[in-house]
């Protein structure tokens, strides 16, 4: 009936930490505070208060041994698990996805909006990068190849269950078009820019922060700084830590996971933030800019949308030590006058409040249009 408040469900692949995808869920819950949450596995103690405040329904994977820590090992079961959620009675389903959440099964009158962080990187365009980084033996490689073949077929089929795609960047929009042959609107993800502010003068080091995994290409930065002798600090954890520590010279420090206050302090005091990988969007370069610090990024992926060349950072053309060192040389020569306030202003465009405003308006407008399509000419809703 007119004025009816839609019943909303939020489907997310897994809730075991508060990284970029989970921060989107946190903001969605703030926009739709009555929404229920569905996820494959969950560790409530690691989630925000906003997420924990809502009913969270988990899949049968939650009951399997070590599922909350080794959930990625259950990838072949994830399509089955996501399809078991009973979403009958929900008017709107918002799937937040870089994996299998888009495969949730909804009824014909339900509006399914997929907020896509990326199509499955490990199944599509970054498949070979992931396979090389896993260090698998021959038999495991064969098993993984068979699994990924199945996952690609299922993923395309699942994409047809979505009514509207929303991409987190123009880069991801292109991936959606390539892999799913679907168009998408773009709403950039939320960045806690208010949590990062400039303070004081920069120190004597460059900074990298994030997961230490192969596709981030942090090895390129370690090689570059080994050669130049400049100081580099790397914050984060991941499968590449041991290898990079073995590579690193005395001027390169990997200091592991750090609390927020330490991270904020390093953002504020770094000469510049180094971003050598290809990301779907990339929140850390915006956190650095919110701290008044420039970004030196590889020219690819989401960084092309969030770094303003010559104003808030510089790009390097190849993922090589030589190319990265060339960008650092240009930065230190002062070829471009990068203003800290320009960095802050650019980051402010991606605030959490801006995301809530955009996604809330988008969903409700889509809901109104969906209801008009499902109403009979007499004005009565179709049963």
Image: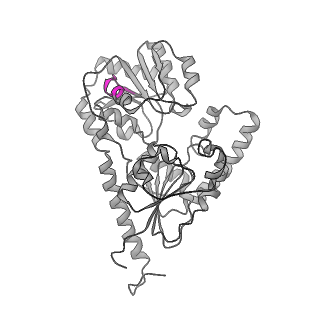
The reply to whether the magenta stretch includes residue 268 is yes
The quarter of the picture where the N terminus appears is bottom left
Residue 292 at what x, y percent from top left? 28, 30
Q: Nearer the viewer, residue 156 or 107?
A: 107
The residue at the point 35 percent across, 43 percent down is 191
Residue 303 at what x, y percent from top left? 40, 37
- Vertical order, 291 against 75 (above or below): above
Q: Which residues are magenta?
A: 265-273
Q: Is residue 167 visible?
A: no
The reply to whether the magenta stretch includes residue 179 is no
Location of residue 197 (image quadrant): top left
The residue at the point 54 percent across, 19 percent down is 245
The residue at the point 46 percent across, 19 percent down is 253
Residue 270 at what x, y percent from top left? 34, 23
Q: Is residue 354 left or right of residue 158?
A: left
Q: Is residue 195 left or right of residue 152?
A: left
Residue 49 at what x, y percent from top left? 40, 49
The residue at the point 50 percent across, 24 percent down is 220
- Vertical order, 297 against 360 (above or below): above
- Vertical order, 239 against 8 (above or below): above
Name, please, the residue furthest toward the bottom. 378
Q: How is the image coloured?
A: one colour
Q: Is residue 46 visible?
A: yes
Q: How many marks?
A: 0
Name, please, the residue furthest toward the right. 139
Q: Nearer the viewer, residue 221 or 86?
A: 86
């Amino acid at each position: 009936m007119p004025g009816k408040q839609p019943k909303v469900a939020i489907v997310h692949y897994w809730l075991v930490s508060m990284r970029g995808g989970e921060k989107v869920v946190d903001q969605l819950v703030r926009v739709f505070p009555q929404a229920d949450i569905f996820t494959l596995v969950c560790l409530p103690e690691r989630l925000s208060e906003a997420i924990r405040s809502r009913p969270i329904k988990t899949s049968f994977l939650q009951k399997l041994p070590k599922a909350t820590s080794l959930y990625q090992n259950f990838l072949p079961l994830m399509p089955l698990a996501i399809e078991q959620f009973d979403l009958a009675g929900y008017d709107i389903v918002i799937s937040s996805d870089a994996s299998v959440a888009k495969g949730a099964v909804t009824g014909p009158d339900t509006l399914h909006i997929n907020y896509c962080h990326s199509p499955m990187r490990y199944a599509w365009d970054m498949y070979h990068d992931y396979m090389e980084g896993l260090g698998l033996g021959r038999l495991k490689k064969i098993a993984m190849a068979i699994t990924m073949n199945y996952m690609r077929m299922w993923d395309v089929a699942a994409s047809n269950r979505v009514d509207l795609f929303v991409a987190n960047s123009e880069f991801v929009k292109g991936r959606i078009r390539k892999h799913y042959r679907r168009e998408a609107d773009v709403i950039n993800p939320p960045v806690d820019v208010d949590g990062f502010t400039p303070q004081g003068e920069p120190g004597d080091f460059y900074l990298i922060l994030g997961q230490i995994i192969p596709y981030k290409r942090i090895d390129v930065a370690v090689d570059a700084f080994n050669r130049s002798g400049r100081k580099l600090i790397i914050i984060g954890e991941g499968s590449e830590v041991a290898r990079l520590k073995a590579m690193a010279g005395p001027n390169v420090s990997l200091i592991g996971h750090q609390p927020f206050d330490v991270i904020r302090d390093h953002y504020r005091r770094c000469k510049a933030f180094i971003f050598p990988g290809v990301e779907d969007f990339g929140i850390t370069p915006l956190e650095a800019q919110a701290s008044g610090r420039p970004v030196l990024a590889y020219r690819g992926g989401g960084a092309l949308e969030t770094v303003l060349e010559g104003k808030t950072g510089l790009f390097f053309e190849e993922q090589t030590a030589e190319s990265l060192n060339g960008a650092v040389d240009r930065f230190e020569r002062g070829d471009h006058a990068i203003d800290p306030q320009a960095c802050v202003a650019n980051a402010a465009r991606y605030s959490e409040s801006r995301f809530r405003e955009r996604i809330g308006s988008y969903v409700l407008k889509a809901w109104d249009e969906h209801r008009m399509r499902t109403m009979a000419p007499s004005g009565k809703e179709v049963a």
